[in-house]
Amino acid sequence: MPPASGGAVASVVRAKGACVEGLLYELDNVDLRELDRFEGHPFAYERVIRWVRDESGRRRRVMTYLQPEDGFEAWTPPLGYFTVLWHAYARLGFDVEPLARAAGVSP
């Protein structure tokens, strides 16, 4: 069943040889609690620690939100949500090809 927001949302799934582009932010505890509320933690998303490489290749320990894998069902995102992601990828200079593949559309 889709989340209460009315449709599917993006998450990150491990895949050998794959990568996900993103942004790194430094948050204080007040901002983190606010982000938790916005993201629906701990009900909709889990907060997890992962290792990533920044743009200079330095390994960094980061926190991200992931959909819980227990009972995970893949759903097609609503067009409006996908459009927001598409425009953000393009504006930030990220490769839209992986996003298109994940959504099953042509870039």
Image (cartoon, rainbow, N blue to C red):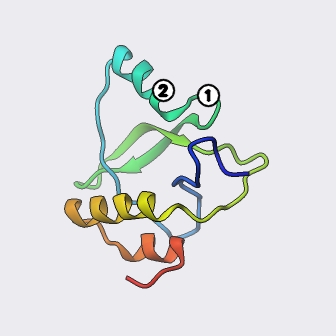
Please indicate whether residue 71 sits to the left or right of residue 17 in the image.
right
Question: Is 43 situated above or below 5?
Answer: above
Crowdedness near tag 1: few (<14), some (14–19) or many (≥20) residues, C-alpha within 10 Å = few
Q: How many marks?
A: 2
Query: Looking at the image, which residue is at 46% across and 65% down?
Result: 79
Q: Quadrant of residue 24?
A: top left
- The one of 40 and 93 positioned closer to us in this rendering: 40
Q: Are marks 1 and 2 in contact (CB under 8 Å)?
A: yes
Label 1 amino acid? Pro
User: What quarter of the picture does the C terminus occupy?
Assistant: bottom left
What residue is pinned by disc 2?
36
Question: Is 44 situated above or below 91?
Answer: above
Label 2 SS:
helix
- Residue 45 in the image, given as x and y percentages of width and height: 59, 37
What residue is pinned by disc 1?
42
Q: Quadrant of residue 96?
A: bottom left
- The one of 2 and 96 positioned closer to us in this rendering: 2
- The one of 19 and 103 positioned closer to us in this rendering: 103
Label 1 SS:
loop
